[in-house]
Image (cartoon, rainbow, N blue to C red):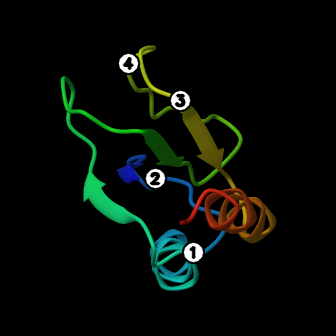
């Protein structure tokens, strides 16, 4: 599965967003992770938001998972692992 990754601007991050994505990539390594681009082809898109504003947006044609905390990252890992092989 190809997973797009989009970050918010990071202006008010309340957790270590990069570390969360590194953990997701490591623990759900059966997937291919690519930077999100409008018009790209992805099976899922993970949007990494740093605070409650959740300002980062993506097109509506993708299945989107918003990550706003380490707990959200843990949930995303479980979801991704359930779709491996």
Q: CA distance from mark 2 to mark 3?
A: 25 Å
* Disc 1 versus disc 2: nearer the observer: 1
Find numbered disc 4 in the image and state the secondary structure of the residue it sits on.
loop
Q: What residue appears at the point 65 percent right and 67 percent down from the top-left corner?
A: 81
Q: Earlier in the sequence, mark 1 or mark 2?
A: 2
* Residue 29 locus on image (x, y percent): 46, 79
Which numbered tag is attached to residue 59? 4
The residue nearer to you, when weighing 38 against 54, is: 38
Find numbered disc 1 in the image and state the secondary structure of the residue it sits on.
helix
* Residue 78 locus on image (x, y percent): 74, 66
Which numbered tag is attached to residue 11? 2
Q: Earlier in the sequence, mark 4 or mark 2?
A: 2
Q: Are marks 3 and 1 in contact (CB under 8 Å)?
A: no
User: Position of 6 compared to 76: left or right?
Assistant: left
Q: CA distance from mark 3 to mark 1?
A: 19 Å
* Residue 58 locus on image (x, y percent): 40, 26
* Residue 50 locus on image (x, y percent): 58, 54
Q: Earlier in the sequence, mark 3 or mark 1?
A: 1
The residue nearer to you, when weighing 77 against 52, is: 77
Q: What residue appears at the point 38 percent right and 18 percent down from the top-left corner?
A: 59
Q: CA distance from mark 4 to mark 1?
A: 23 Å
Q: Are marks 1 and 2 in contact (CB under 8 Å)?
A: no
């Amino acid at each position: 599965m190809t997973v797009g990754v989009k970050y918010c601007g990071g202006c008010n991050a309340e957790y270590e967003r990069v570390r969360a994505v590194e953990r997701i990539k490591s623990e759900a390594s059966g997937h291919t992770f690519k930077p999100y681009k409008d018009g790209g082809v992805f099976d899922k898109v993970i949007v990494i938001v740093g605070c409650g504003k959740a300002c980062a947006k993506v097109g509506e044609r993708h299945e989107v998972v918003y990550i706003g905390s380490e707990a959200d990252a843990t949930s995303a890992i479980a979801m991704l692992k359930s779709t491996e092989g």
